[in-house]
């Protein structure tokens, strides 16, 4: 099979590329950034319809994986235009180019942020979509656009709603590297490595056992395997749908810090701060649908392993 991976230079996209290459697929990456690994790369912005038409005329793809988007909740609140332009409008350009080229299968990176403040835990796919920030709304808008594109053109899609993507490639080939970094686990590990003074805990007054926020951390290698199953599902004629991807287990910020202390054997300084705007107290997935329909079985589902792989990556790449 030949796949286009849009956003294949990023944290999760590059893990997907490694997964597809290991399975002997042909892969082309389209990204504004050059990937850090050796791959056929087309430097383009998906907002550029002409560049997409050229790309689709050069290769015949069986399906497209779309990972390219802005992902910072806080920034989406202060710069909504940036999020709607990149995450929604540019995706629309991609979808129209796919229809012109008759590439009719898409795997789309969505997010648990489409649900907003949970009304029940664990969250299944039927949970109301009441996103509370432009990031979550931008992803939900694309999901709705995808339903319309299926009805109008027969473009079939699987939307994968990630909970907290975490960890690093089990073989040390890649990991998290956002600039600026805003995610909990890499920030904790940077503090452990001495690359930052301390990690900040946003809020200890939540209605949770230890007062800190609870999240469902899911390993990027398990996310990649879910995408691979999703594309098989689509190529075998499966109907457009959405799946939650999470382990169904919640860990608090404090538990993650404690685990990082155990894994690294380092002292990690902690500073307390007020709640971060837009953070629900608890997000835990019901991913039963992905297990049942796709046969998805996460294999790196312990917090210890997630943190250990992330720590290995942090140490393998002493960036500064
Ligand atoms: N968090 C924190 N300190 C940080 C970064 C994050 O306490 O420096 C908390 C945040 O409030 C949330 C959890 O860690 O409850 C996970 O946040 P992250 O940004 O990693 O992912 P998100 O849940 O926003 O997708």
Image (spheres, rainbow, N blue to C red):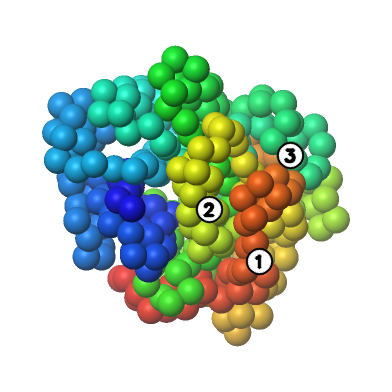
Residue shown at 51%/63% (left/top)?
Answer: 221
Residue shown at 45%/43% (left/top)?
Answer: 235
Q: Earlier in the sequence, mark 1 or mark 3?
A: 3
Q: From the image, tell me which residue sits under label 1.
A: 301
Q: Earlier in the sequence, mark 3 or mark 2?
A: 3
The foreground one among 59 and 283 is 59
* Residue 31 coordinates in the image, percent (x, y): 26, 45
Q: Is residue 123 visible?
A: yes
The foreground one among 3 and 128 is 3
Instruction: Name the side, left or right, on which 315 lies relative to 45.
Output: right
| Quarter the C terminus occupies | bottom left
Marks 1/2: CA–CA distance: 17 Å
Say if 247 sits above or below 265 in the image: above
* Residue 211 coordinates in the image, percent (x, y): 79, 52
Say which quarter of the image contains residue 62: top left
Say if 162 sits above or below 49 in the image: below
Name the mark nearer the viewer: 1 or 2. Answer: 2
Marks 1/3: CA–CA distance: 19 Å
Residue shown at 38%/32% (left/top)?
Answer: 104
């Amino acid at each position: 099979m030949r796949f286009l991976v849009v956003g294949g230079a990023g944290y999760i996209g590059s893990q997907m590329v490694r997964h597809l290459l290991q399975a002997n697929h042909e892969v082309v990456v389209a990204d504004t950034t050059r990937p850090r690994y050796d791959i056929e790369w087309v430097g383009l912005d998906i907002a550029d319809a002409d560049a997409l038409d050229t790309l689709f005329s050069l290769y015949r793809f069986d399906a497209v994986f779309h990972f390219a988007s802005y992902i910072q909740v806080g920034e989406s609140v202060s710069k909504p235009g940036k999020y709607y332009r990149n995450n929604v409008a540019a995706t629309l350009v991609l979808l129209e180019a796919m229809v012109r080229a008759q590439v009719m299968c898409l795997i789309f990176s969505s997010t648990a942020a489409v649900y907003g403040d949970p009304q029940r835990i664990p969250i299944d796919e039927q949970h109301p979509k009441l996103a509370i920030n432009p990031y979550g709304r931008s992803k939900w808008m694309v999901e709705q656009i995808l339903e319309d594109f299926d009805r109008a053109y027969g473009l079939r899609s699987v939307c994968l709603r990630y909970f907290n993507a975490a960890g690093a490639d089990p073989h040390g080939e890649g990991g998290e590297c956002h600039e600026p970094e805003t995610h909990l686990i890499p920030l904790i590990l940077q503090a452990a490595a001495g690359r930052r003074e301390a990690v900040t805990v946003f809020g200890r007054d939540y209605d949770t056992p230890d007062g800190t926020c609870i999240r469902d951390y899911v390993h990027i290698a398990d996310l990649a395997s879910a995408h691979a199953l999703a594309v098989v599902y689509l190529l075998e004629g499966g109907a457009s749908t959405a799946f939650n991807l999470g382990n169904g287990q919640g860990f608090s910020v404090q538990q993650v810090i404690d685990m990082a202390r155990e894994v690294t054997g380092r002292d990690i300084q902690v500073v307390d701060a007020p709640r971060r705007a837009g953070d629900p107290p608890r997000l835990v997935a019901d991913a039963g649908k992905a297990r049942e329909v796709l046969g998805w079985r996460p294999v790196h589902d312990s917090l210890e392993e997630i943190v250990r792989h992330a720590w290995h990556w942090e140490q393998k790449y002493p960036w500064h």
